[in-house]
Image (tube, helix red, strand yellow):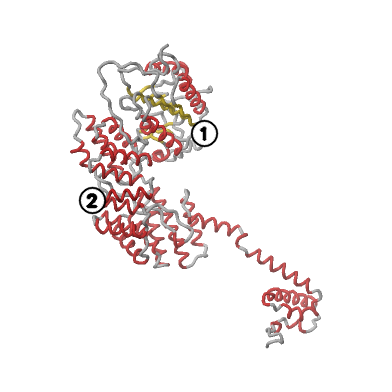
Amino acid sequence: MISAGGRKRPWRNFPPSLRAKRSNPESQELDCFVAALLAMTARWNSDSTHFHHIAAPKCGDWEKWMFKAFLLLFASLLAIAPSSTPAHADFESDKRACIYPGQDLDGEIAACDRQITSGRYRGNDRAIVYRNRGIKFMNRWSRRNAASDVSLALMDFSRAIEMNPRYADAYVSRGKAYVAKNDPDLAISDFSEAIRIDPRNVQAFNSRGDLLRMKGDNDRAIADFSDAIRLDAKNNFAYRNRGFVYGLKNENDRAIRDYVDAIRIDPRDALARNNRGNIYLKTAKYALAVTDLSEAIKLDPSFGAAYANRGLAQEALGNAAAARNDFTVALTLPEKYANGKWAQDKARERLAALDGANAMSVSSAAVATAKPSAPPPSSAPSAPSISPSSIKIPSIASSMPTATAPPSPPVNAQPATSPAAVAAPVVAVVAPTAMPPSAAGDRRIALVIGNSAYTNASVLANPKRDAALVAETLRKTGFTSVTMQTDLRKDALMAALRDFAVQAQSADWAVVYYAGHGMEVGGVNYLVPVDARIAVDRDIEFEAVPLGQILNAAERAKKLRLVILDACRNNPFTAKMKRTLEVASRSASQGLAAVEPEAGTMVVYAAKDGEVALDGAGANSPFATALVKNLPTPGLEVRRLFDYVRDDVMDLTKRKQKPFSYGSISGRQDFYFVAAK
């Protein structure tokens, strides 16, 4: 029925008891309360006036009933509002953890588990959560190398595809998991299906092209990389990968052009620099090769393959000392990627040749074996985006071994230690006549580091004070430049070494003093930054800085390279560090291992190899105290200086600590911190 005003009469469904006088007050109050609730919910339809018209005569103070109804509705809304509940906050926190990459992968996987079991996702949204969890499993695999994580990831990617058969990114993710399982045919099938579903999927083209390259199908690989470039003209991975394949086909000009584009898009692409350096090496453009490989090392100081390749170029240029240094540094770096082993094998081979009476001819022996190495994964690591449809899986191939990688110069590794200069140092022929003492006009530079405030190891009281004392003493002896830095994290320590290496190119003396924690694992000495976290002995390669990088930072100085280490203290991580390295048979808790630096470099330990240095009970360590006492002595030649330091330290420690020197400097020239008066 329609009223005169043209509106429906909702009061026909109104509680019948309100249409007649009721004798039970409690029932009438309940009816009034229900009427007020109905009136409140009907207000949005402009119908509450009808309830009021009928209810008001029987309910008395109608506004009171309306207020009670409002309070009940408001309390109900508060009770069901998700944004105000702890459960909702936990859900949102889990959602972020499942989407974004972080450090706690176990916790992030657990967050994805809770997202999946929450029951809040259906269809495509649920498929996205499964893919996100699969990505977490693959990231955990890349860190722990547990095959079970790859299997779990494959299950999640397959579930995502079952829920949404047109989910192209899930096919790409599953394809990468198949690559990790060394099943390239299934991987290619998934990448092809992703391309069929989404012909603009750049990641799928890049990934499939990389596998086709590995299978030797270079023309199809180039076609895929070209499609990726067509779809994304700023994709430096596609340019770099296509340049690598052109190099395999000996189309060197095309390879160079692609590497030029890759570097133009990303000037910090160390891999493209290394690959282009390989092409220059192959075409006997050794000076250009040194330039590119030096830049690759500067961008990525742990790039072992770049060091090995630059060593080959230096050897070809006749710079035997520089070549030997590069090969030596390559041996100190961990094997990364498929070409890591090549770098170390080549470094050992060339060092043996250089140490022999008749070194092999580079053109026939060294360069002939330098082939470009397998390029890095075709897709860059990218964090999952908030938008489910745009979530990209982090690059898996970047950390997995490549089964078919050739034993040739690496293209996709991570560089080594020092930011070497582009120009190779010329090895001067020493005249048979004695040279004069080092002149007062020599350019002398020093880098002084003191690490005390360790966050995951025992704090050392003295290194910062020792560094300040040594730095001030060096300034007083007339050093051109003294850079002092304290409590350095690993990135800051690497940056300091890079800057110092640049300064050393134009210096006559380069002195590095380091006070802080140091340790030896597997026969390799490491300096420990203040933020190092070392739970397993293998962590040391990623958390600490090899001594070879310190030596490399000073190697460009023309006359004297001196590295002074007050870092032979006990390994602070021994009690909690898990041992896994078979080669680390000697105790990793006792000081540093002996070193054999190349001619012209002297390394001084505060305590002999295998022994422990004392931090000291005073304001400075015994070694620092003895060093600053003797260093300003006029006319005390550097070799004799450290004999004096040794004797003083032994006296101060009651013969518990004995400093020791390694290496040799020119016997035809004397070196004085302060010349005789």
Q: What is the crowding at mark 1: few (fewer than 14 residues within 10 Å), some, or many (at least 20)?
A: many
Closer to the chain start, of discs 2 and 1, is 2
Which quadrant, please, contains the C terminus?
top left
Q: Quadrant of residue 149?
A: bottom left
202 and 605: which is toward the camera: 202
User: Which structural element holds mark 2?
Assistant: loop
Q: Quadrant of residue 39?
A: bottom right
Q: Is residue 555 above or below residue 406?
A: above
Pointer 2 residue: 251
Report whether residue 4 is seen: yes
Q: Position of residue 5 (x, y in %)?
A: 71, 85
Q: What is the crowding at mark 2: few (fewer than 14 residues within 10 Å), some, or many (at least 20)?
A: some
At horizontal 44% and vertical 64% (from top left) the residue drawn is: 127
Q: Position of residue 260 (x, y in %)?
A: 32, 48
User: Amino acid under label 1?
Assistant: Ala
Q: Position of residue 240 (x, y in %)?
A: 32, 51
Report whether residue 308 is seen: no
Question: Tag on residue 257?
Answer: none
397 and 428: which is toward the camera: 428
User: Amino acid under label 2?
Assistant: Glu
At horizontal 19% and vertical 35% (from top left) the residue drawn is: 361
Q: Is residue 17 above or below residue 319?
A: below
Question: Tag on residue 453?
Answer: 1
User: Which structural element holds mark 1?
Assistant: loop
Say left or right for 604 vs 404.
right
**Mark 2 or mark 1: which is in front?**
2
Q: Label 2, label 1: how many angstroms apart (C-alpha)?
A: 54 Å
